[in-house]
Image (cartoon, rainbow, N blue to C red):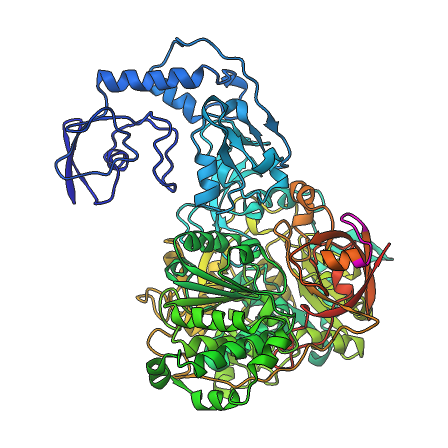
Amino acid sequence: MIRITIDAREIRAAEGQTVLEAARKAGIYVPTLCSSPDLKPYGGCRLCVVEIDRMRGLPTACTTPVAEGMTVRTDTPAVRDARLAVLDLILAEHPLDCLTCVKNQRCELQQVTARLGFTERHLPRRSRVQAIDDSNPFFRLDRNYCILCARCTRACDEISGNNAIEITGRGYDSRVGTAGDRPITETNCRSCGECVVRCPVAALAPRIDTIPDNEQATICPYCGVGCGLILKTRGARIVSISGDSSNPVSKGRLCVKGRYGVTGFVHHPDRLTGPLVRKNGVYTPVPWDEALETVCSRLAQYKPSEVAVISSAKATNEENYLIQKLARAVLETNSIDHCARLCHAPTVAGLAAAFGSGAMTNSIGDLKKAACFFIIGANTSESHPIIGFDLKQAIKNGARLIVANPAPVPLASRADIYLQHTPGSDVVLLSAMCKVIISEGLFDRTFIEERTEGFEELAASLADFSLDQAAETCGVPLTDIKAAARLYASSQPAAILYAMGITQHSHGTENVLAVANLAMLTGNIGKPGGGVNPLRGQNNVQGACDMGALPDVYPGYQKVGDAATRRKFESAWGVKLPYRRGLTVPEILDSIDRGKIKALYIVGENLILSEPDSGRVRQALSKLEFLAIQDIFITETAELAHVILAAASFAEKEGTFTNTERRVQRLRQAIQPAGESRPDWWITAELGKRLGGKGFNYSGPEQIFNEMRALTPSYSGISYHRLESGGLQWPCPDEDHPGTPILHAKQFARGRGIFKPVGYLPPAEQPDADFPFILTTGRSPYHFHTGTMTRRVTGLKALQPREILEIASSDAARLAISAGDTVRVTSRRGAVTAEARINRRLKPGVVFMSFHFPETNTNIITSPASDPSSGTPELKVAAVRLEKV
């Protein structure tokens, strides 16, 4: 520690601290307007000037590091005069409409002015009027209030890494501006609001900014990052949201959906406020008793082989545990599945085979330690924005980046090497990289010998592998493939990140095994900054898998076919359990179509928009004798239900979510459920009791969690009490265990990691004369999955109101398609229309769409071909043709 003196007080400060930080820690007030604890020191506002012995002038406390023996004075006449002079300059052209200003009583300039006793202006009032940017639906930029502290521009650089705004002009003409002075919505701004929350005045302010009277910390309901939210409430409504700075994952940062995309759907007038039963073709509100008895009486009519259950990655761990328990212990079926079948089922299968555990090996927080990132089949900055923030900062700090993606995702422009391979050629690309690493001796021989098996078999399988043919298949120059292999192998540590671009293929499990081979070849497993990191798409898709919402495993991935495991659960639940593997979602739909499955209970899934070949999905669901749906809205799928059970939203209940890095975190209730809606756990428990099930009398989610962890070794040491301090990562086998930030650190979960030779099978559909284009799909930064939540947020709809078809400029020119034209996209299964957008970086012959809009249901045209190992459909490759409408 360093000893310094501030205002005659001896202070102990840490090495590297600034004078401002040391003073604040000691409770000594030093005014500032440009300083922010998560931004680099700037010294722009000059309000934090102090006197320091043996230093000339008045140095800024925010940029001056502490030094042993330093003597600082923060409140001398010279310091006071300098600060008042700065305030006089600021206030000379700052609006003085404080009482009606949106930041009244929360304005830092107002607070500093009062604290310093500034009561009289000495400089003449200036009447300059500056432009207001009113283009963003969530906030406005009013430069008339701007004090040029640069917090906003620094946040856009140092936090989000987007650099959408900068201080432009010089001297008196300096202002917060954009490239070409375009409206902020026409830049690469992603509306994350990091600039807004750091603005000390009203220059950047939310359009609606109601002062709350309460707040509650909880977890975001969108992607799998698991960001911490502070839900700020007034009365019964959420009025604003801020990031939770204590959350170990997000550290106070949020994306556009987390910050601005919650209130609109939670309080939307379309919310279900009570159960509905279809009577004479019309949905009729009924009491809960009637709705529950209707569901139970109908489900009780069917044999176990005639019933299936689909759980939800939006539901909590406790709720997923109960739903699979209901299926197995009451309905006597293992036909329980959820949307992981659409995304990371190949991850569970592939990584479990190679490593012994099908989950992200490392932690989000240690990715910044990577010397190199290899991102394949993921649009990280758009789909997992907070991880994207970290990656962009790491790249600025010197980390190298390889991106492999058929679509020119934003991070591709920052890559050292961009491999724009043909959709569906991932196995070939990854195998080619492995071939280069082996043939050039770049592999980690010690790691392979000490910790793996099967290397000789892998090397033998690649002996006759043609790199030239691989380059041709991938559509990537061989020099780039070799450069990528060398960069990845020579960078230590190196992290692989992937998402649905790897898994949503008819060979998705092979893709995952190829990723595992590459990581093990270079010894990048079990170390900080390395690993294989599948990025989960939904807030609790990891948890839903962990809880056994799958047809072949109980909670904790304990096999239903294992007799000893089955006896353990039979003893705990007091029933005999089915022993045969159940059906996956695609198999359930096939069985419905064939008349085998007659009744279906769906929780929080919108199959008609999420499943491929959705016309066939609708046709199948229409054949059901009984369909019960539990959701917060009447979704496109719920329109077919016989009974709709009104569920509470994430903000209206308690529980836990498990994020993509295996971190279990507490979900907390901020407001009461809408109307007569109920938490999913309560609804499912009531069904269990009324169907005669044992052990469904729960007082709340904590009791359910405790039952689950007693049966699940990887969760055994996790309790609600322990989760109060920021979450724990499984495996956590006992209550003294700190959790596991990095898997396979000393040995693999299966003992030794195993190399698996993989072969190439082309996608099920290839372009031909009738369907000459390849359609690949992904997410928009402004919407989420089937849009059930985001399409009900007015501001998000304003940022992207409709589906977009991205098409290469050469293809657009050949077909006489211009930006904004309506284009019909047709596959072998149907057709949809979308608005064209010309993408000059997209590879000719490839088009891109999202899947968020029911009026353009992209999944009408996607392919139902699936990976034989996991059942995951090939949503990333479909052959289509285009016609200008």
- Nearest the viewer among 464 and 361 is 464
Horizontal side, residue 170 vs residue 858: left or right: left
| Quadrant of res 846 | bottom right
Q: Does the rendering let one see residue 719? A: no
Residue 826 pos. (x, y %): 82, 64
Residue 39 pos. (x, y %): 38, 41
Residue at horizontal 46 percent and vertical 59 percent from the top? 702
State whether residue 607 is above or below residue 168: below
Q: Which residues are magenta?
A: 814-821
Horizontal side, residue 313 vs residue 359: left or right: right
- Nearest the viewer among 540 and 437 is 437
Q: Does the rendering let one see residue 91? A: yes
| Quadrant, the C terminus | bottom right
Residue 805 pos. (x, y %): 74, 56
Horizontal side, residue 732 vs residue 29: left or right: right
In the rendered structure, does residue 620 fall within the stretch colored magenta?
A: no
